[in-house]
Image (spheres, helix red, strand yellow):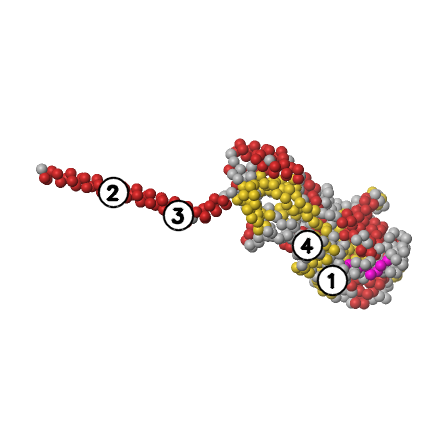
């Protein structure tokens, strides 16, 4: 009996042990649970409360006000205005059901007049499979996405007042560009425009730890807006707003203030700029209604440019190009139709700034520089050459385009009457002396060397992006051009045919590298394949005016902080001196004085007080194969350079002369043909040397250095 009871006792003991173990496990679980609850509610309670609060707070980037761009007197050329922007919070939008999203997007589409498909596309992150380039969002996935800009205030207020109908929709005021247009100026090519930052630019900024831009930033794309973007853009701020589960804003939760952009002070005179733009447009209109006796139709006058420089330091006083565009086109987004027009050949490419990016044959405005080269290499002021009606070079007759036959004359008279055959003889003699070996690319060419000394063939270095370099059509260029194109023409040359194309192809294939006498005589009068920009030519004439110093043209004068502190002064930069004889420079300078008195511009400067405003000038009519002549007038005194060019518009003085005169009248206060010589002409009218005054209340006042006396202050 005793042996039978032992197993039972052992089983009971094991059961109690199991029960104790289970109880211990249960107790340990409860202890762990209570410990965790105590930790979360007591020790870590504040941290978790903060995390929970953050889930209902959205961080918004506050775009800073972009810096102003002002003229030399402090008049705003580019300012800012308030624009209402509607944004969508992607996080809150994606929490909504698909039907609710559809209802919201359709409702928002009707309010802001943006198609639903565009709203959807805008909320997709760039890089997602269904995202379309150009419409997707390239910013932070947690940043509200702007879907409608420049919304009418009435619409913006309506959306804010009916927040329950627009969950996940935010409405914020932002600063956008405005154009006050003092004196009606446009200056689009100078000022440039803005567009949204690209994903590549944003990635590059992040790689360089640049916090001045974000996904909603706009950046400069052209003109001064691009060149000085890092100063103008400022630094964004950050604002936290509390929202409920439907995305409705409940209130602010703090803000990190940004920094407005700096002000850019320029050397542009708004009054002169307005005159320049008006005269350029008027000249083109007039030319288009003028009969061309050569082509027997009206002039096309398809483009043009004007440059006004301070001859003593290279600062730009005014500069315009045609065709142009309205800079307001870019504000608040640009339509595909508007963009297509800006890049349209039919509209003659309005985005192309002819003053710095257009490249044209200089025609007879080239001759003063060739004269300095000739006088430095074997010719002298006493040289007399025949100004005949034509000049024979090989089997080709080179005619005298602008002037009649004047017999034997000197360089001074040849410049004043723009005698082509005189300069043909100069070029031919130098070619005979140095360049009869047509295959020698290293043959000495004093006139080519002189052109390069005046800065032609390379960019001037102006503080605008996209400047063209022009082209010096010398022996090196001609051989390079032949190598690049001989394959094409040699194929044509092998085919039968005796028309112009086939004959030219055979000649080019065999000897297209040869720099012949015809190339030399074309070069000396600014014809052939040599191309210049209007700014290059104006800069070279400034060197004639100031005794031979070449400057990098500058538009900006200074960068000023929002508080009025000068951050950076942008001084004129000297490139160097033109290494030709001083006597040659003085001779040309003196000779060009006669052009406005008895030469090709005299009939346009009648009754102008040339005794007080001593204007030198040179006209040009550049011939272009298959097109009408390009009109040029280059003029200067010791203070200013005024240059005008209009393509397919006829002669220099006939087309551009009247406008050039009126620009000089604006600079010096000469009004019309009736001149009060005692009062109207103020030869001391010079650009202001000092900067505008930035008052404590934010007002910008004219400089106080006294240099605003004179006619450039007229209308100020």
Q: How crowded is mark 1: few (under 14 residues within 10 Å), some or many (20 or more)?
A: many
User: Which residue is situated farthest in the front direction here?
Assistant: 42
Disc 4/disc 1 C-alpha distance (Å): 28 Å
Residue linked to disc 2: 20
> Could you tell me residue 119's position as x and y percent?
59, 37
| Mark 2 vs 1, N-terminal side | 2
Residue linked to disc 3: 39
> Could you tell me residue 368's position as x and y percent?
80, 60
Whether residue 216 sits left or right of residue 492 in the image: it is left
Residue linked to disc 4: 263
| Mark 4 vs 3, N-terminal side | 3
Visible residue check, residue 561: yes
Q: What element carries label 1?
A: strand
Q: Quadrant of the N terminus?
A: top left
Query: Of residues 233 and 628, which is closer to you in this image?
Result: 233
> Could you tell me residue 309's position as x and y percent?
77, 57
- Tell me if label 3 and label 2 are in contact, CB under 8 Å: no
Visible residue check, residue 528: no
Disc 3/disc 2 C-alpha distance (Å): 28 Å
User: Which residue is situated farthest in the left direction here?
Assistant: 1
| Mark 4 vs 1, N-terminal side | 4
Residue linked to disc 1: 550
Segment colored magenta: 681-690
């Amino acid at each position: 009996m005793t042996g039978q009871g032992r197993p039972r006792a052992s089983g009971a003991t094991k059961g109690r042990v199991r029960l104790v173990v289970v109880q211990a496990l249960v107790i340990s679980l409860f202890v762990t649970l209570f410990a965790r609850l105590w930790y979360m509610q007591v020790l870590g309670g504040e941290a978790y409360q903060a995390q929970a609060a953050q889930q209902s707070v959205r961080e918004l980037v506050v775009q800073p006000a972009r810096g102003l761009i002002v003229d030399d007197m402090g008049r705003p050329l580019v300012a800012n205005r308030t624009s209402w922007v509607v944004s969508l919070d992607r996080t809150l939008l994606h929490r909504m059901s698909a039907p609710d999203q559809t209802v919201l997007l359709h409702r928002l589409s009707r309010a802001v007049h943006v198609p639903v498909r565009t709203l959807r596309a805008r909320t997709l992150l760039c890089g997602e499979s269904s995202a379309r380039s150009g419409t997707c969002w390239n910013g932070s996935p947690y940043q509200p996405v702007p879907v409608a800009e420049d919304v009418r205030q009435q619409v913006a207020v309506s959306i804010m007042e009916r927040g329950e109908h627009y969950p996940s929709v935010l409405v914020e005021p932002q600063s956008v560009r405005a154009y006050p247009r003092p004196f009606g100026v446009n200056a689009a090519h100078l000022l440039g425009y803005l567009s949204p930052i690209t994903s590549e630019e944003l990635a590059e900024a992040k790689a360089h730890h640049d916090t001045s831009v974000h996904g909603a930033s706009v950046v400069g794309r052209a003109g001064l807006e691009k060149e000085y973007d890092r100063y103008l853009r400022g630094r964004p701020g950050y604002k936290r707003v509390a929202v409920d589960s439907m995305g409705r804003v409940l209130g602010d939760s703090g803000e990190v203030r940004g920094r407005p952009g700096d002000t850019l002070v320029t050397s542009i005179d708004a009054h002169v700029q307005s005159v320049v733009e008006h005269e350029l447009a008027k000249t083109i209109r007039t030319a288009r209604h003028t009969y061309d006796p050569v082509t027997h139709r009206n002039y096309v006058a398809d483009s043009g440019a004007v440059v006004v420089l301070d001859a003593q330091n290279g600062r730009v006083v005014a500069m315009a190009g045609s065709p142009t565009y309205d800079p307001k086109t870019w504000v608040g987004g640009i339509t595909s139709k508007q963009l297509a027009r800006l890049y349209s050949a039919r509209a003659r490419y309005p985005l192309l700034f002819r003053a710095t990016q257009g490249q044209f044959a200089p025609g007879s405005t080239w001759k003063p520089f060739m004269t300095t080269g000739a006088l430095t290499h074997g010719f002298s002021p006493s040289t007399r050459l025949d100004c005949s009606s034509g000049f024979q070079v090989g089997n080709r007759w080179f005619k005298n385009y602008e002037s009649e036959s004047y017999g034997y004359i000197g360089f001074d008279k040849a410049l004043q009457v723009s005698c082509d055959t005189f300069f043909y003889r100069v070029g031919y003699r130098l070619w005979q002396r140095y360049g009869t070996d047509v295959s020698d690319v290293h043959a000495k060419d004093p006139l080519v060397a002189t052109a390069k000394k005046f800065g032609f063939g390379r960019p001037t270095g102006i503080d605008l992006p996209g400047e063209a370099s022009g082209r010096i059509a010398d022996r090196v260029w001609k051989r390079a051009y032949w190598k690049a194109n001989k394959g094409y023409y040699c194929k044509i040359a092998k085919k039968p045919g005796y028309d112009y194309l086939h004959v030219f192809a055979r000649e080019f294939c065999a000897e297209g590298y040869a720099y012949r006498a015809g190339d030399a005589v074309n070069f000396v009068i600014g014809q052939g394949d040599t191309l210049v920009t209007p700014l290059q030519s104006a800069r070279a004439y400034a060197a004639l005016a100031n005794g031979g110093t070449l400057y990098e043209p500058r538009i900006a004068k200074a960068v000023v902080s929002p508080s009025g502190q000068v951050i950076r002064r942008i001084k004129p930069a000297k490139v160097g001196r033109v290494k030709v004889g001083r006597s040659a420079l003085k001779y040309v300078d003196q000779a060009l004085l006669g052009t406005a008195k008895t030469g090709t511009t005299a009939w346009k400067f009648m009754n102008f007080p040339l005794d007080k405003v001593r204007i030198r000038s040179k006209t040009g009519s550049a011939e272009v194969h298959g097109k009408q002549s390009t009109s040029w007038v280059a003029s200067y005194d010791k203070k200013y350079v005024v240059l005008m060019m209009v393509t397919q518009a006829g002669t220099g003085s006939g087309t551009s002369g009247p406008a050039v005169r009126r620009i000089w009248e604006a600079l010096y206060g000469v009004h019309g043909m009736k001149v009060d010589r005692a009062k109207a002409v103020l030869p001391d009218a010079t650009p202001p040397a000092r900067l505008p005054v930035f008052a404590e209340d934010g007002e910008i006042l004219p400089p106080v250095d006294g240099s605003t006396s004179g006619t450039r202050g007229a209308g100020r």
